[in-house]
Amino acid sequence: MMLKFIAAILRLFHFRYVLLVPIVSCVSVQEPEGGPPDESPPKLVRTFPEGGALNFKRKIIRLTFNKDIAVENPYNNLLIMPKLDQPKNKQPYTYTVYEKTLQLKLNVPLKKETTYSIHFSKAVKDTHEGTKATGEVLTFSTGSFIDPITVKGKIKALLTNKPIGDVRVYLYSAERDPKEWQEKGIPDYYTTADQDGNFTISCIHLGKYYIRATTGKDNTYKIDYEKDNYGFLKNPIDLNDAREDIVLPLITADVRDLKLLRSTPQKGFFEIVFNKAITNYQVIPLQTVGTKGKPAIYSFLSEQSPKVIAIYNTFGLLEGDTLKVKLKAEDALHRSLEKNILIHFKEGKTDKTSLSYSLSPRVLPSILPDFTESIVFNKPIKEFNEALIYFECKNQQNIALKQGEWTWNGNRTKLTIRKHFTPEEIMQFAIQEEERDHKGKSIKQVVALQIEPGACMAFDQSTHKKISQTYPLRKKDETGTISGIVETTTAYFIIELLNQKDECVDAIRNAKSYQFKMIMPGSYRMRLLVLNEGEEEWSPGDVLQNIEPNPVIFYEKEINVIENWDVTGVDFKF
């Protein structure tokens, strides 16, 4: 009986197994549904009004795409040009999204006889993959024609005269209050320059417009003065006729006010942090310390961190003690700050570090008889012995550094040596031979600067190792000259010789008949920077005060210099 029962169970199991096999088999070979994600962007397929429509007076605008959409921050990213009027207590339009269609309901009337363009690509995206939409800009008119005015132009870097691409260009109607659009940033018209710096804006309503450009990529339509390159023209451009000759130069200039962000005690020093780089500063004690009177203050501003001043505790203040000082600081645009502060320190000392140095980068390795070198230390220098600095010559003879041939910066961290070598001194320098391509050997004289240990001692008694640096002296018969005249009524300017990296190789000031001497063979460009009276440096202007940068004039042709050749006739006229 039991055997019959077991046999029945086995037959039943076998039958179910046979039925299950084809089912499992079918499931295992079935292809998965769906396929790869659709990352194609939504494309505009239908609009109301239609593109190019005339005499449009309705308050409803619809944009329909080929797939379901979502919108992202439309009041910033959906740009209607020219800008709609701003009603009180609400947006100029409301919007709804249903599947593939974005509908705008205007809360303000459109201007009469005006061409409008709607730029939607930054606001509309695919609901699934988030891909931004593409398609033609929707353009229509409330009048009997599409506005015909077009402006074309070029974006260039002012200091190199080279085109800059991928730059946003904005137009603001001169009828608007400049303070309003400077704060809110929304332009009446905008476009993006191509990779060669060329831009075009079409369908512009007749009138006058301010123009701005920026390399910034955010969606606020504002210039980030700390990070962006930007350009502007002081006066509005007249677009009652088409313009194709606009050249908009870009500069880099942080025009923000100079501000003190924080001042913090540390072990052994007091840290002061600004919102931007500073170029000059003073820390003046306003109190005495003990019976020694007002203390000497040693501080440090790093060229790598020009926003931070460190004031060292060299006067023995304990934790809780304070010293009142006057802080004066200035940035590259001469924006200044003056403030009284209390400096104090945390208990303890910083680990003592060695006195290190770096040499200022040189554009050319060789030097002229007019020699300049700058040595930057990592600490302020307290004691200096110029007798330990000299130029080494052959036959164990040395040329000493004389009084007036060296200077320190304000916080005594940068030593600059300037010396003119006479023909007699040049004859004393050592000689080296070097191979020249296909020309045999060349004889070069070498200038050797020696700074012995102890020449500079920091505030904490640390000293540097020996500094030894050699420079090949440039030879006249291996160089050429460039000369010309400057025809101008301007009295103050700088003529600069630029290499292929746009680095300044040499400069001449205020000379209406000039000559660059002993120029190494190569290709060069030249520019002339116009200066303001009484100023040593070229001014980038001030966009916040609508002051344009000082003019920069380029010589149109590239200049090729060869050995023993004088290039003449490189003239400027302005």
Image: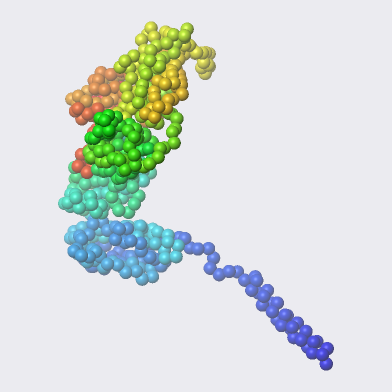
Image point 69% across, 79% down: which residue?
20
Applied colour scheme: rainbow
> Is residue 85 depicted above or below 447 in this figure?
below
Q: Is residue 264 visible?
A: yes
> Is residue 428 depicted above or below 131 in this figure?
above
Image quadrant occupied by the N terminus: bottom right
Image point 38% across, 12% down: which residue?
400
Image point 22% across, 23% down: which residue?
487
Q: Quadrant of residue 373?
A: top left
Judge by depth and name the residue closer to the eye, 396 or 562. 396
| Residue lying at the far bottom of the rendered structure | 1
Q: In which quarter of the image is residue 526?
A: top left
> Is residue 318 depicted above or below 17 in this figure?
above
Q: Position of 460 compared to 236: left or right?
A: right
Judge by depth and name the residue closer to the eye, 32 or 342. 342
Q: Is residue 52 visible?
A: no
Q: In which quarter of the image is residue 157?
A: top left
Image quadrant occupied by the C terminus: top left
Image point 80% across, 87% down: which residue?
7
Count of numbered circles on the image: 0
Q: Could you tell me residue 297's position as x and y percent? A: 30, 32
Q: Position of 339 compared to 382: left or right?
A: left
Q: Could you tell me residue 69's position as x and y percent? A: 39, 66
Judge by depth and name the residue closer to the eye, 372 or 220. 372
> Is residue 206 depicted above or below 99 in this figure?
above
Q: Position of 471 compared to 109: left or right?
A: right
Q: Position of 212 compared to 194: left or right?
A: left
Q: Could you tell me residue 204's position as x and y percent? A: 24, 52
